[in-house]
Image (cartoon, helix red, strand yellow):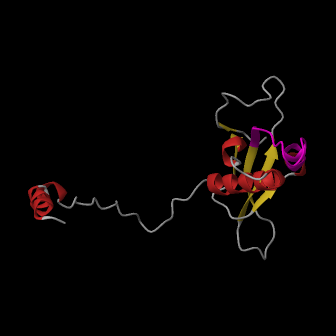
Amino acid sequence: RTSRHREAAKADAHLWLPVSRHKMAKTDGKKTGKADVVTRDYTINLHKRLHKTTFKKKAPRALRAVKKFAEKMMGTKDVRVDTALNKFLWSQGVRNVPTRVRVRLSRRRNDDEESKEKLYTLVQHVQLGNNPRCKGLVTENVDES
């Protein structure tokens, strides 16, 4: 650096003062985790997740993208994909994966005693009759009854 740069840096030194960090409120030690069992409908845009993907890898990568999305939204490592959703993703072949897919994510309790995770996520395909492109749909909570 030249001396001119050093002088300019010294002149601007007052602008770079450290910002005081706010401390988070203390809790009583209990975790405020997510609701135990919940079901929601989401629209996943596969087109942006599969951009610049080799043709022969598109459908398998779409399945991985759905699993990653479910893991992120529901916060569980154990994600199970329904066979109907798998068939829908592969319905147009390995190359022509649907642009968007409407899915129902259900966080459920794991009945298996030996499992590490006590919750898992089930991903199911939601059939749409009048809006097959899934445009303009928002995330909805679903009542399980």
Q: Which residues are magenta?
A: 86-103
Residue 114: x and y, percent? 78, 77
Image height of 23 relative to 135, above or below:
below
Who is closer to the viewer here, 24 or 124? 124
Is 90 inside the magenta-drawn segment?
yes
Quadrant assignment for the N terminus: bottom left
Q: Position of residue 126 (x, y in %)?
A: 81, 38
Find residue 138 and report its horizontal and vertical position in percent. 64, 33
Question: Farthest bottom residue?
Answer: 114
The reply, left or right, for residue 99 in relation to residue 75 is right
Q: Using the image, determine if residue 12 lies above or below residue 101.
A: below
Q: Is residue 46 rendered to the left or right of residue 34?
A: right
Tell me how many marks there are: 0
Task: Reply yes or no: does residue 108 show up in magenta.
Answer: no
Position of 42 relative to 1 (above/below): above
Find residue 56 and report its image quarter.
bottom right
- The answer, for residue 41, to whether it is visible in the render is no
| Nearer-the-camera pick, 16 or 118 | 16
User: In this image, 81 relative to 134: left or right?
Assistant: right
The quadrant of the image that shows the C terminus is top right
Q: Is residue 145 visible?
A: yes
